[in-house]
Image (cartoon, coloured by chain):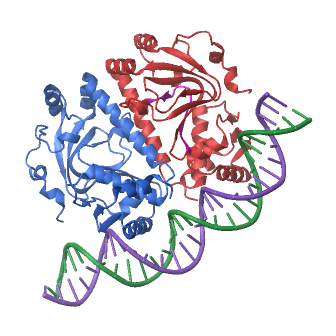
Chain colours: A red, B blue, C green, D purple
Amino acid sequence: MAYEGMMNPVMQDQARCVANCMGCGAQPQCLIARSRITDVQHWNGLVQSQQNLASGKALFEAGAPASSVYSVRAGCVKTFTIDADGHERVLGFHLPGDIIGLEAFGQSQYNMHAVALTPSQVCAIPRASMTEVVAGSAELLHRLVERLSHSLRAALTLAGDYTADQRVASFLLEMQRRLSPLPGKPMRLPMSRRDIANYLRLATETVCRVLTRFEQQGLVKVEERRIDILAPAELQRSASSGV
Amino acid sequence: MAYEGMMNPVMQDQARCVANCMGCGAQPQCLIARSRITDVQHWNGLVQSQQNLASGKALFEAGAPASSVYSVRAGCVKTFTIDADGHERVLGFHLPGDIIGLEAFGQSQYNMHAVALTPSQVCAIPRASMTEVVAGSAELLHRLVERLSHSLRAALTLAGDYTADQRVASFLLEMQRRLSPLPGKPMRLPMSRRDIANYLRLATETVCRVLTRFEQQGLVKVEERRIDILAPAELQRSASSGV
DNA sequence: CGTAAATTTGATGGTTTTCAAGCCATGTGG
DNA sequence: CCACATGGCTTGAAAACCATCAAATTTACG
């Protein structure tokens, strides 16, 4: 249970239920980042509440009324669907600064589940407020559409027909970027091999084998969920080249 | 060269270079559809120009400044990228009412190519105008985000690990819906087998084989690009069930 | 400390790709 | 009008890649 998220100062502040954007640990990545102080204050007023989620707890379920979007402050939240056969399909991993629930815009219900993979903290923003503040600030509107179009590009990338090697390599590099551990420090993945495999549309065993092979080739150092990328450039080539 | 698109009245009106939303054939599907008359007029003023595209002509290329988004009035426009190895990757087919270029929001350049598959007609809307009008109308903002999130869901669907049968079945049903031919009439696909295969991340041969099998099973009637769906319900089952 | 879950490794099989070749439609030029 | 060329479409055989099944090993946690 010794998740690193537990050590985050933000996590320890469990008593405060009203959000406070000033001094938030996720500021650099947040939608509101680097905005005018008045915008931040306005935004701050809209954030309905913060929510602490224990590892494995659901943020919302498919079919629930899509009343809010959520901005991740700390931890990691997995979104996924469950198809008719009961199979899980991982749609994404949301790290601090990411917004969850934008896909449900224009729908009355969420069409996916959201579950915390590690102890997490999110800010709930009522959808109506979201529309309002964004309509009032061209800057924020721009950023919002930017995010949506970025997600769209990411999804289209995921939709490509890449080999298992390419998928895993890309995933490791993307995670390295988003988790941005201290240089030289290995990153700690918040998700299981099973979740990675499901997200990449591969079998769990395939992900294992690829990681083993990458390690044998000296590209990475794997130690359970701690992964150190030794040769980013070569890994990048594995990600793009068809070999 | 006898594309059906040529018969569309809108297509014949090649002299008019300033858009006129009133009476546009794509109205029912357009973003502006069913808006207040003042909104339509405002929108109409923003539409910089219409553009006629001969079959095979490029609307824009990857790397070009992303100055506008485009609303398709008639025809079909394919968007795709070309990777380092020179391989094409089809991202989508845009039919009347669809908006092209939203993915480039927040980027200075398009990151994909857009080419007309049949004689087509598009309305260009400068990006600044787009932002402005959308900011001025909560209704339009809502619709825009709705579209983006719809595209996102579609991309996530495409990203699933479906069998060749499932992919082709889904594609046929989706095209039937979007092309909405007269009941009983077969639809005419605007794109080649190669484009379909590329879009579905399959080999051209695989698409052929699946179509042949579907025809043998009596699910569809295939005659070159004219395809008649004989058993929509069964095809739907092929699309969802893993069998 | 013991059980359950996660991870890893091996062997086998199935789906799809690749390579190769033939067919069909369309359009061109004689 | 027909021969011919071109590109799209279709079919067949072999190989590649990954999933599945099975089992050993490790880790997590009550």
Q: Position of residue D11 (x, y in %)?
A: 42, 77
Residue B66 is a magenta residue: no
Left or right, residue A77 beside residue B52: right
Left or right, residue A242 beside residue A144: right
Q: Position of residue A241 (x, y in %)?
A: 55, 56
- Quarter of the picture containing the C terminus of chain A is bottom right
Q: Position of residue A131 (x, y in %)?
A: 35, 21
Q: Nearer the viewer, residue A235 or B8?
A: B8
Q: Nearer the viewer, residue B87 or B98?
A: B98
Q: Position of residue B237 (x, y in %)?
A: 43, 54
Region in magenta = A86-101
Left or right, residue A224 beside residue A125: right
Q: Is residue A203 above or below residue A57?
A: below
Left or right, residue A177 beside residue A153: right
| Residue B192 picture quarter | bottom left
Q: Please state the total of marks drawn on the protein image.
A: 0
Residue at the image position 66 percent from the left and 20 percent from the top: A8
Confirm whether residue A205 shows in the render: yes
Confirm whether residue B201 shows in the render: no
Residue at the image position 46 percent from the left and 29 percent from the top: A101
Q: Is residue A90 above or below residue A3?
A: below
- Quarter of the picture containing the N terminus of chain A is top right
Residue A96 is a magenta residue: yes
